[in-house]
Image: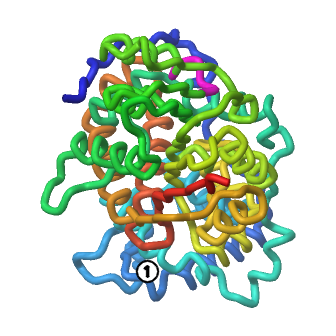
Amino acid sequence: MTTSPTRQPDTAAAGHPARRRPGPVEPRCSSARATAARLVFRHAVKSLPVRVALPGGERLGAGGPDSPVMRIVRPGAFHRRLGADAKIGFGEAYMAGDWTSNDPAALLTPFAARMADLVPRPLQVFRRWVDARHPAHERNTAEGARANVHRHYDLSNDLFAAFLDESMTYSSAWFSPGDDDLHAAQLRKVDGVLDLADVRAGTRLLEIGTGWGALAIRAAERGARVTTLTLSAEQKHLAEQRIARAGVADRVQVLLRDYREAHGSYDAVVSVEMVEAVGADYWPAYFRTLDRVLEPGGRVGLQAITMPHDRLLATRHSHTWIHKYVFPGGQLLSVPAIQDAVRRHTALGVARSRSLGPDYARTLRHWRTRFLDNWPQVAATGFDDTFRRMWEFYLAYCEAGFRSGYLDVVQLGLTKPRH
């Protein structure tokens, strides 16, 4: 039987620096760029199954009466934000209240499905001049990775507890057919990863990316001895409390350590949705680490969010809203990119795989519903309405990516030859 420790009060002070992020400011944008953005936006929505309502009664889009609605409250500010940087401005406009929607995830799904051609192809050649590039300080060096992790995962344990299930698992669940129980689906996902790595009694297991300890607890309950690595001080603190309450502290060691600093030899390695925080420059180092610490004959259970390979190549240098406000330094992989990194930098081979994309859409729907339902308790810890709109847009934006099939999440079982 799996223990589900109760949630504990946040250990961070209400004035935690990570909470005091500035909201979106009015962008500097020429009237020509704002006009161009207005024309491109109108072109993009004219064939989408959505309804766009503007002040004065004008309607755009090809959606019928049951289609999701986007209400543009302040057209001038909205177009200026798009003109300044469309990849960031669209989300900032939602944060600022320049537009609203009755169902943002449903609204964003058609946009995600048409991501490759929302901008007319003749204009896409200008991407290199108009797209912002990743800031140098967000590169995932050992120091940069710690700063990036701090900005997201050290926001507040209470914030995450407000929308996650009782296992505090912050990654895609795996639902059984006909069962919409999020907690059961999260435990099923964890078991799936542990099975891919063949974790059992006596296994020496390394986990890269602790989260709040759910996988480490589950592995220890199988009889494994677990070393788990995190860069988040907040996560480490709460994970150790949860591990102790589950009665497995004698079998789990939580280390505040970068994956590049991992040492020792292990029968199995697991890593769930951590590789997205590594960055393309460091993919070789990450996969080499898996290979280096794994004993011959050992196995890896890996869960990763993926995107189409052609979109990875087209957007890999772009700095987007999700980077600026949610995951600084983040970079999704594609399945071919994972396969290439494994082949070029390790002795590992991909033995098994499964796709959970639709399950992630359901997971995100649960999270967004829980977040909005529990917003009063989140607000009481010091977060404002701009943060609420930011977090709602983040969850809806991601849900749309998985609902449309633009994004996927895969579980991979990797093996290392015995000789």
Residue depicted at 59% across the width and 24% down the height: 232
Q: Residue at x 40, y 12 (%)?
A: 241
Q: Quadrant of residue 290?
A: top right
Task: Determine the image quadrant of residue 331.
Answer: bottom right
- Residue 362 magenta: no
Residues packed near mark 1 inside 10 Å, few (<14), some (14 to 19) or many (20 plus): some
Position of 350 compared to 161: left or right?
right
Q: Position of residue 303 (x, y in %)?
A: 49, 52
Q: Please give the residue where the numbered disc 1 appears in the rendered image.
A: 60
Q: Position of residue 154 (x, y in %)?
A: 56, 24
- What amino acid is at disc 1? Leu
Looking at this view, is 198 or 69 the one in front?
198
Q: Which residues are magenta?
A: 230-235
Q: Position of residue 215 (x, y in %)?
A: 40, 34
Image quarter (top left, top right, bottom left or bottom right) of the C terminus: bottom right
* Left-right relation of 263 to 137: left
